[in-house]
Amino acid sequence: VLYHNDEIVIREMLGYPVHGFIYHRREHELNFNVNTISSLLQAMFHCISHLIQDNIAHNLLITRTRVFLFVRREEQSSQYPIFYGFSDVSGWITVLNEAQYHTL
């Protein structure tokens, strides 16, 4: 846990191939109220404005209970004939041709 208060929790994603953060309400909160939403947005804005200012690419994935902030790193070449992107770390792999697909 990187930060928490009475309303929200911010966690760093660990053990996952993508660097990122998870923003969510505290477990005891049954519903989002105006204060919780405001606290969540202020925390997210602080981080996202820093990423934008430093020209760091990022993606947001919003679910009913959490917001995932994926921070992109510089691309590294791969020994495999595929290109990694957001969809790849979400469970999809893009392969350029069918012959290469059958060799994986």
Image: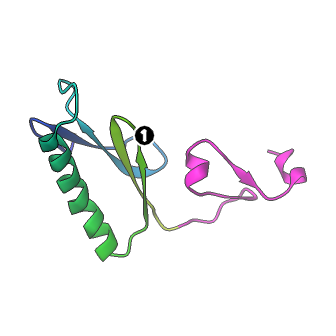
Image-quadrant location for residue 97: bottom right
Q: Main secondary structure of the magenta part?
A: loop
Location of the N terminus (image quadrant):
top left
- Given residues 2 and 57, the one toward you in this image is 57
Residue 3: percent from the left, percent from the top?
Answer: 16, 44
Label 1 secondary element: loop
- Given residues 48 and 104, the one toward you in this image is 48
- Given residues 103 and 32, the one toward you in this image is 32
Residue 90 painted magenta: yes
Residue 93: percent from the left, percent from the top?
Answer: 68, 48
- At 21% from the left and 24% from the top, the residue drawn is 30
Q: Is residue 40 above or below residue 63?
A: below
As drawn, the residue found furthest toward the right would be 99
As drawn, the residue found furthest toward the left would be 6
Q: How is the image coloured?
A: rainbow
- At 21% from the left and 47% from the top, the residue drawn is 40
Residue 76: percent from the left, percent from the top?
Answer: 57, 65
Residue 1 painted magenta: no
Location of the C terminus (image quadrant):
top right
Locate residue 30 relative to residue 60 in the image: left or right. left
- At 88% from the left and 51% from the top, the residue drawn is 98
Q: Is residue 15 above or below residue 82?
A: above
Residue labelled with disc 1: 15
Locate residue 91 relative to residue 67 in the image: left or right. right
Image-quadrant location for residue 49: bottom left
As drawn, the residue found furthest toward the front would be 34
Q: Is residue 78 above or below residue 8?
A: below
| Magenta residue span | 75-104
Locate residue 68 relative to residue 44 in the image: left or right. right
- Given residues 58 and 16, the one toward you in this image is 58
- At 55% from the left and 66% from the top, the residue drawn is 75
